[in-house]
Amino acid sequence: MARSASAAALHDALLRWYAVSARDLPWRRDDASPWAVLVSEVMLQQTPVARVEPVWREWMARWPSPAALAAAPAGEAVRAWGRLGYPRRALRLHQAAAAIVGRHQGEVPLDEADLRALPGVGTYTAAAVASFAHGQRATVVDTNVRRVLVRVVQGAACPAPSLSRAETDLATSLLPDDDGQAARWNVAVMELGALVCSARAPRCGDCPVAQLCAWRLAGHPAYDGPARRTQKWHGTDRQVRGALLAVLRESDRPVGAKALAAAWPDDGRQRARCLDGLVADGLVEPLAGGRFRLPT
């Protein structure tokens, strides 16, 4: 869909829908700081809003600025991360806070290149912070955006497993020229994908752009692209790592090997491998006497 009357109609319909249908999320409010937005974007990676919001609120109450988090031990960030999953994100946020204090006088940078240089901040997160925190015209492409655009514009059920340059170019071509409108457009497309144009049960009858949707007009053809991987959980190293970290988070003092063995008694070799991985990732510190603790 080129920048045309059709694109203008898409902008108008979706932005009007967003104005009345957007969720009241604290990191989207006008008083949310750039740091609050950055924390939310890191937490929301592969994690649903319902799980993120209470943890985000606790983090912002405890560490309302990069300087506050940077001054705390890294292990406290891991502890406060709880069960959000992918706990290396907590370490990266702690490292990013320290970098913001050291390089940017404690202020989340404006420039996307500076944002990408922060630990744990990739292309998507940098663009999201530039757009949602600083109101800039940046191309924000997450899973929801990809799904909405491939359906509405290209007529396919789902995007390919990996983001392509063509998808990024399409998203850029649809950005409104005005910075503020572009930022609002980005979040509106994401919201449509989260609330209406979902992966498994799209509610086309409630969609504000249904009349413009190429997928609907084509009769909702099924996905026929490369096979999409599904992630298992039970018995995986991720589950074991989570069980070991849970023991360490819940203890105020170093934990011995016996307590960790009780957390995952099924396979000692898997447990040892996962514990070694946690140490290598900087999430756990080994101590003398076979004891372990969260990083200081």
Image (cartoon, rainbow, N blue to C red):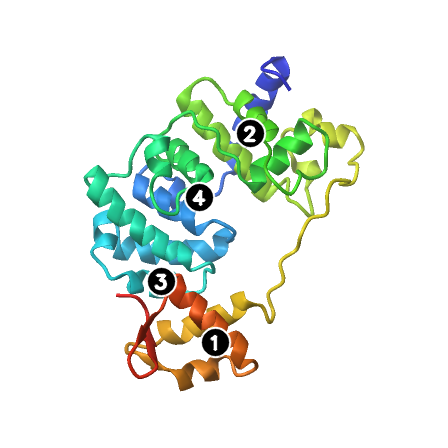
Measured in 3D between alpha carbons, the distance from the residue under mark 1 to the one under mark 4, in whole angstroms, is: 44 Å
Work out whether mark 3 precedes mark 4 in sequence or the reverse, and give the earlier one.
4
Label pair 2/4, CB-CB below 8 angstroms: no
* Contact check, label 3 and label 1, Cβ < 8 Å: no
Mark 2–mark 4 distance (CA, rounded to whole Å): 28 Å
Return the disc, 2 or 4, that comes first in the chain's sequence. 4
At horizontal 34% and vertical 76% (from top left) the residue drawn is: 292
Label 3 neighbour load within 10 Å: few <14, some 14-19, many 20+: some
Categorize mark 4 by other alpha carbons within 10 Å: few (<14), some (14-19), many (20+): few
Q: Amino acid under label 4?
A: Asp
- Residue 87 picture location, percent across and down: 42, 60
Judge the density around disc 1: few (<14), some (14-19), many (≥20) Cα neighbours within 10 Å: some
Name the residue type under label 1.
Answer: Ala
Q: Which of disc 1 and disc 2 is earlier in sequence?
A: 2
- Could you say which quadrant of the image residue 168 lies in? top right
Secondary structure, mark 1, is: helix
Compared to residue 53, the image places residue 195 above or below, namely above
Distance, label 3 to label 4, CA atoms, is 36 Å
Quarter-of-image position of residue 75 = bottom left
Could you tell me if residue 75 is visible in this image?
yes
Residue bearing mark 1 = 272
Image x and y of residue 192, in percent: 58, 37
Please state if 203 lies on the left or on the right of 279 as rendered.
right
On residue 66, which mark appears? none
In the picture of the structure, the residue carrying the numbered disc 3 is: 282
Q: Which residue is mark 2?
A: 168
**Considering the numbered disc 3 on the image, is that residue within a helix, a strand or a loop?**
loop
Q: Is residue 67 above or below residue 248?
A: above
Amino acid type at image mark 3: Gly
The residue where tag 4 is placed is 24
State which mark lies toward you, 3 or 2.
Answer: 3
